[in-house]
Image: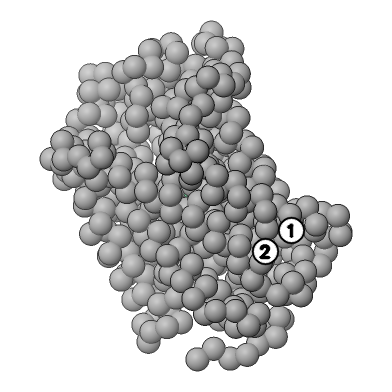
Amino acid sequence: MLKTQTTEQISGHGMWSSKLAFILAATGAAVGLGNIWRFPYVTAENGGGAFVLIYLGCIALVGIPLLMTEILLGRAGRHSPINSLLQLARRSNASRTWSGVGVIGALVGVLVLSFYFVVAGWTLAYVWTYAVELVGSHAFQDTPQAHFDALLASPARLLFWSSLFLAVSVGVVAMGVEKGLEGSVRLLMPLLFGLLLIMVGYGMASGHFLQSVVYLFEPDFSAINGNVILQAVGQAFFSLSLGMTGIMAYGAYVPRDMHIGKTAAIIALADTSVAILAGLAIFPIVFAFGLESTGGPGLIFVTLPHAFAAMEFGNLYALAFFTLLAVAAWTSAISLLEPATAYLVERTSFNRPVSVLIIGGSTWLLGIGSVLSFNYWSEFLLWGKNFQELIEYVSTNIMLPAGGLLIAVFAGWIVSRVIVREQLADMNDDLYQVWRVLIRFVVPIAVLLVFLVAAGLI
Ligand code: TRP
């Protein structure tokens, strides 16, 4: 049973050691494969400029308000997302069913992670390849495309590297989130940023840079259709880690004196700049080598090796780049495990290590389906998508925005205003009103409209 508690309560799972610690952890959760692997390839599949424009609009109008909302609900509830929602519903005399949003969120986390850790395994496989390459033996076969295809064709290699990645993530969550994570993020995130800048510099020198800027920022409105909009919304949720209560889980460990609005803006800005930088690093190479052969989820794993091969000390850069990408993926994977784990800890007699092992084990089993989607099951299609593509599409483009819609309705219409205003006490009245209008009207209506348009009903 949950006790009735005051708002000054402390989470039973521990707390971030400072405001900066939370900013680093949340930025770590946001910045990951979504920015560097997914953003460029989904942009390429959706025609560039118009997609990016809608994406940026979503970050500002839907992303930042929802980021604030997840943090504040977490901090007001101080429990795992499921129990925080339950408690807030009770304190607001609303139906307990609202905690179901947390149950769905925890499940969506497992769904997203089930393909995320497989892609993260690719980055580890590349770390290994470049490490071997660096000590002088030849590990990189033929062309980048052939090398990537060979990796995908081998379920054993995929399973080995992805399992290694998942095991490390599970290990960190088992130890408790404060330890280890903060330090690594503090050091490695700036390094990743710096390395991306170097890659952008290479793109600038390659002669295709301007073409990439035009491609990313000149909207071609004729390219917009319901599915492009849905993909842009989904990508915005995916990149900011919204809609599945992962940020809400982190919010429960946030110190009382942190300014939620400012923090949300910082996180969104950091996340968006990394995505744009990744685009500016990758598209010059795409244009230099031809997009057709490099579309799809393999985009960065095929284009970047072309650049590394042409750069001086390319192998060293490649090793650094894929190592940092693996770390970025790792700080994100942790946030996907946290909601379900925190709930098991509260609800069952299992301790943290056992709980995360149960969640990680289920994720791993589901992940086998994603591993096989790149080889044995690649021809096995449902609605034109293989198993991995289907999980990615449904979880990202449908379940995350739907979760975000419900979270917005809950915070805007259900939770007592006193609780919400208290969390945003350091915000002036005007900004508070803006947030309130966005969360009550703009976010729910926008997501609903996007669903209707994508379904062809409007
Ligand atoms: N945002 C991370 C990325 O861009 C992935 C991620 C972490 C995520 N937590 C999430 C995606 C929660 C959706 C929901 O790589």
Question: Which residue extends farthest front?
Answer: 457
Q: Is residue 163 left or right of residue 275?
A: left
Query: Against 277, is 441 above or below?
Result: below
Q: What residue appears at the point 52 percent right and 42 percent down from the top-left corner?
A: 450
The reply to whether the residue tagged 1 has its Cβ within 8 angstroms of ligand 1 is: no
Q: From the viewer's side, name the closer residue of 270 and 181.
A: 270
State the mark number for residue 436.
1
Q: What residue appears at the point 49 percent right and 55 percent down from the top-left corner?
A: 402
Q: From the viewer's side, name the closer residue of 181 and 36.
A: 36
Q: From the viewer's side, name the closer residue of 99 and 275.
A: 99
Q: Is residue 173 left or right of residue 79?
A: left
Whether residue 315 is visible to the viewer of this picture, yes or no, is: no
Residues at marks 2 and 1 touching, judged by CB atoms closer than 8 Å: yes
Total number of numbered discs in the rendering:
2
Query: Against 158, is 152 above or below?
Result: above
Query: Tag 2's secondary structure?
Result: helix
Query: Tag 1's secondary structure?
Result: helix
Q: In which quarter of the image is residue 52?
A: top right
Q: What residue appears at the point 49 percent right and 16 percent down from the top-left corner?
A: 284
State the mark number for residue 370.
none
* Disc 2/disc 1 C-alpha distance (Å): 7 Å
Residue that numbered label 2 is attached to? 412
Question: Which residue extends farthest left?
Answer: 376
Among the two numbered marks 2 and 1 on one chain, the one whose residue lies closer to the N terminus: 2
Q: Name the residue type under label 1.
A: Arg
Q: What residue appears at the point 25 percent right and 57 percent down from the top-left corner?
A: 366
Q: Quadrant of residue 38?
A: top left
